[in-house]
């Protein structure tokens, strides 16, 4: 049985964390840790993928508002990283094996 995920809460948590970092590596670490948390909590891959797609949508909309340049840059880093991650067939094993 797959566990449920509160996508709105998760998106809010990630975007709040992104406010306090600078640079693509720190942004990637936030996403990797977030995905690992969901895997450890028993969320299945398809739910995580749906969540990541929803996160992309939210971040894309937020970059259109013309807010703080650092925030926009971090959101763009995350969007690119997630797009790349979702195109990788072995994203789950990669996320679990990478040392951060």
Image (tube, rainbow, N blue to C red):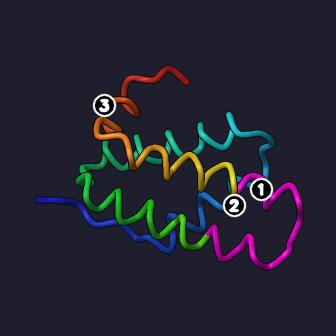
Marks 3/2: CA distance? Answer: 26 Å
Marks 2/1: CA distance? Answer: 5 Å
What residue is rendered at 49% in x and 52% in y? 83
67 or 10: which is nearer to us? 67
Q: Is residue 75 above or below residue 92?
A: below
What residue is rendered at 86% in x and 72% in y? 67
Principal secondary structure, stretch drawn in magenta = helix
Farthest right residue in view: 68
What residue is rendered at 50% in x and 40% in y? 33
Residue 20 percent across, percent down from the top left: 79, 49
Q: Which quadrant does the C terminus fall into?
A: top right
Classify 10 Å Cα crowding around label 3: few (below 14), some (14-19), many (20 and above).
Answer: few
Range covered by the magenta-colored residues:
59-75
Secondary-structure class at tag 3? helix
Residue named by callout 3: 93
Residue named by callout 2: 16
């Amino acid at each position: 049985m797959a566990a449920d995920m509160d996508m709105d809460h998760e998106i809010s948590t990630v975007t709040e964390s992104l406010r306090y970092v600078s640079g693509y590596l720190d942004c990637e670490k936030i996403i990797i840790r977030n995905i690992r948390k969901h895997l450890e909590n028993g969320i299945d891959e398809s739910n995580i993928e749906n969540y990541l797609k929803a996160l992309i949508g939210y971040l894309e909309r937020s970059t259109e508002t013309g807010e703080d340049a650092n925030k926009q840059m971090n959101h763009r880093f995350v969007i690119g990283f997630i797009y790349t991650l979702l195109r990788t067939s072995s994203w789950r094993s990669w996320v679990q094996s990478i040392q951060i």
